[in-house]
Amino acid sequence: MSEFTIEDLRRIMRECAGEDESMTLEGDILDYPFEELGYDSLALLETATRIERERNVTVPEDQLSGAKTPRLLLDAVNSAR
């Protein structure tokens, strides 16, 4: 299976949780906390569920809860493959 990329994550975040009008998901968002991007824990849970379903991976709960930025979430998904 191919690597899960920031573009994959952006697409899923937009589809699952929408996009806060005050923030954009474009540009270098890898190290921005999800909260600053306008995504709360419920939106992130839906995003993680969608990723697991689409990619057929299970990200351990401790890694998922520790993924506070897109970079950390990408690392968790790609290491779970």
Image (tube, grey):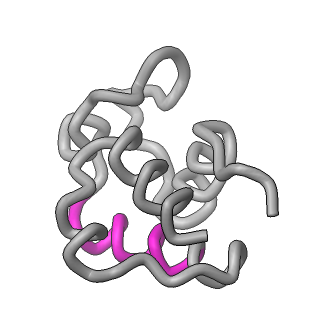
x%, y% of residue 71? 39, 39
Kindly identify the residue that appears in the image at 27 percent across and 30 percent down.
32
Location of residue 38 by image quarter: top left
Residue 35 picture location, percent across and down:
19, 45
Q: Position of residue 63 (x, y in %)?
A: 27, 68
Task: List x then y, in percent, for residue 59.
Answer: 42, 76
Residue drawn at x 40%, y 34% is 21
Is 14 displayed left or right of 23 in the figure?
A: right
Query: Relative to 41, is 60 above or below?
Result: below
Is 31 positioned to the left or the right of 29 in the image? left
Q: Nearer the viewer, residue 37 or 68?
A: 68
Residue at the right extreme, as displayed: 1
Q: Nearer the viewer, residue 67 or 34?
A: 67
Which image quarter is the C terminus in?
bottom right
**Residue 57 is covered by the magenta coloring:** no
Classify residue 33 as left or right of residue 3: left
The number of discs equals 0
Q: Quadrant of the N terminus?
A: bottom right
Q: Residue at x 59, y 38 (%)?
A: 6
Residue lying farthest to the top in this orientation: 27
Q: Does the stretch in magenta take in 43? A: yes
Residue at (70% x, 50% y) in the render: 3
Q: Which residues make up the magenta segment?
A: 40-50
Q: Where is 30 relative to 27, above or below?
A: below
Predominant secondary structure, magenta span: helix
